[in-house]
Amino acid sequence: MTRAAGQGRGPMTDANDRADATASQGATGAASAADPLAGPGSATGSAPSRESTTLPLGTRRGGTRRGLSIQSKLLVMLLLTSLLSTIVVGAIGYASATGALKKAALDQLVGIRGARAAEITRTMENIRTTAILASGNDSAVAASEAFNAGFAELQKQTPTPAEESAVSDFYSDTFVPALEKNAGEQFSDTAFAPTDPAGVYLQSKYTAPLALDYDTALATSDAGDGSAWSAANAEYNSFFASLVDRIGFEDALLLDTDGDVVYSAYLGADLGTNLRTGPYRDSALAKAYDEVLATNSVDATRFTDFERYVPSLDSPTAWALSPIGDRDGRVTGVLALQIPVETINNVMTGDEGWAKQGLGETGEVYLAGDDRTMRSNSRELIQHPKDYAKDAIAGGTPSATAKKVVAAKSTILLQPLRNASVTSALQGKTGTNEAPSYVGGQSLAAYAPLQIEGLNWVIVARITTAEAYSSAAEFTRNLVLSTAAIALLVSLLSLLLAQIFLRPLRRLQTAVQRVSAGELGVQVDTGSRDEVADLGVAFNDMSRSLEIKAELLDAERAEYDRLLHTVMPETVAKRYRQGDETIAEDHQDVSVIFADIVGFDDFSRGMESAQSLALLNDIVRGFDEAATRLGVERVRTTRLEGYLASCGLIVPRVDNARRVVEFAIEMQNVLDRLGAQHGATLTLRAGVDSGTVTSGLIGRSSVVYDMWGDAVSLAHRVQDAAEGPGIFVTQRVADQLPDTIPLTESAGFGDERVFKVDRSAADREARRG
């Protein structure tokens, strides 16, 4: 494998060639004669197995024992006793824990329900108080008189065709299409248009031009038409706009004593209509208006429950109404404030802080009305809108309703509630239960009716049983694990007791079975003084006699195996011992290296043969250690090619190319160290390629393990064609190498692209890494 630049093969190649030939001949001789146990038709035969196969006490080879052994009976008895007691105790504990957890969860829900009920009641009373104070404000009283007068003046006028056309176009082109989109129904273009002169006039000047732009409407004070109504609006609109902007009401209406809507903060479709004769005469707002006006008291109030209000594009709407009166106590009209839905939702969700309220991941508090639909939004819809429809349908909600809820982003007046909690609360009952939820699954709930004058609302606080009983589930898991641990402990205990009872006979039985299975040197303890001990002494004498005979055979087999493993891998040697005559294997993705030493002949010239051979052995030993460390397999050394090794042949490796190149670098490091010790310049010339190779045994009477194929040939040609020392790799190898191994392309290799490894740069990269 060694050569000086431009010279032939060196003495290390000759020495290795002679060693390989001797080993091959020795292995062949061993295969044909040295193995005394080789059977007819096989290369070597095989040694008897000495693995022990222990059978249960009383079991005969070739047959089975009937019934259970003592060990099995003891195991079953202890297991049944312990498991039954554990299951009974666990069942009692589970029932107690579940009951305690349910009580604790319900108590917590009752507390949360009480807190939310008090908060929503306080909020509605604040709205009631605000309505009374706002209706009694001097600005509201003066505004009522001014708007009433301006509206009465407009009633005496006759609408112009242009005004009627503007209103008609607004309803046909803007309002009705928007209403149909929200409501999902068809409506007539004239169903909601005003018919009174004042209504037509006001909507033509204010409502139609704004085209449902409510933000602009709230800031609009004067249409510039010079009417008394516009003058009143310019003076008092800011007061009512502040009720919407600052306090949070969704709209504010002024009505005169005849039912006319003489003012609307948002200048909507209800402006100028009459609640007694107009399109909204059947609304809850109209009914509450008549009731609160009939009290003839400025301190009276009325709430309306949520209903779908057409001027709000069919959105759920609730009102707080209070009469407006002058200083003499004469009622001049009614103030109607639209209750903000967001305020109610914030109260019921705790500003969406369910976990902070103690409702965990699934709990919520919601309101329901006497029509068994929600009056607040569902937590599921707020937090998980994509899952809401699926869960609601699973809980019994019609599919069409669930889709409407998702489209509207609100469960108010849509989500049906047919559960027992709402039913009991609407009957005036307060309590707790466990029942199915509207979003599927079981829930614990605390329910109660609300004491809000004018509203038949109930409140329900709920949480899923899965979350409420999560501690019980953990207890169950712990119980199962404890039961498994007890079963394991009992099994071990029963095995221990059985061993104690049966130990003397089992020791002898086990020893006999081990010997019958081929194991040698088996001895039994004969510490006791009885018939079993005498039998054990006789057995020990027989075992020692068999061991002496086997040792002689083992010595011969060890020498045979040693010779085989010097010339072929263990897997090939195993097939060779089994008698295979043709042994060849194809290997994919193998990296091959051919390498020789440049300068060794010059260095060793003049040395004694023993000294030269010792130095060469040091080099080969260093190569072999590096190969073992990097997962590279040495194949052979020959007079012509030098040191042949591979990676991925015996053990497939995805990084075989990198390993081989690192091995080549390490080979040069070995030469550098030796050269530094002896003052010599030794370099490596190596060719590396990757691809498909074939390995196998060549010859019959004298076998040699070899490797061949395109990758082997190309690696040899690259190494042989190199003009100087270095590590040369083919394109296939270069493509697989990481960037940490720098390469430079080398010329002089014909059509084959070959790269030289920049060893110094690679060493710097390795040190930097």
Image: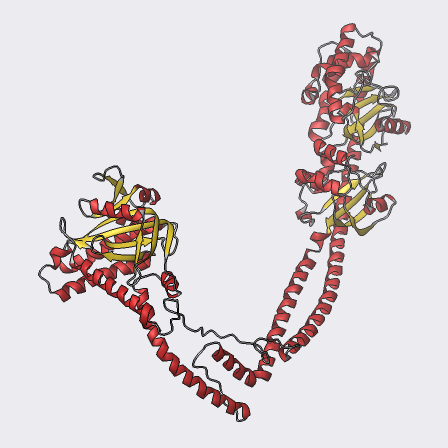
Give the residue displayed 88% in from the left and 23% down from the top.
330
Tell me: residue 568, above or below residue 347.
below
Front position in the image: 504 or 481: 504
Percent across and percent down for residue 457 are 82, 40
Residue 49: percent from left, percent from top: 45, 73
Q: Is residue 598 left or right of residue 100?
A: left
Residue 509 position within the rendered picture, expressed as x and y whole percent measured from the top left: 54, 82
Which of 408/541 is in front? 541
Expressed as whole percent of the image width and height from the top left, the position of residue 581 reads: 37, 60
Q: Is residue 769 visible?
A: no
**Residue 53 visible to the viewer:** yes
Q: Quadrant of the N terminus?
A: bottom left
Is 329 or 582 nearer to us in this picture?
582
Of residues 2 and 479, the one drawn nearer to the viewer in this rendering: 2
In the rendered image, the residue lying farthest to the left is 606
Residue closest to the far top: 161
Q: Is residue 316 left or right of residue 541?
A: right
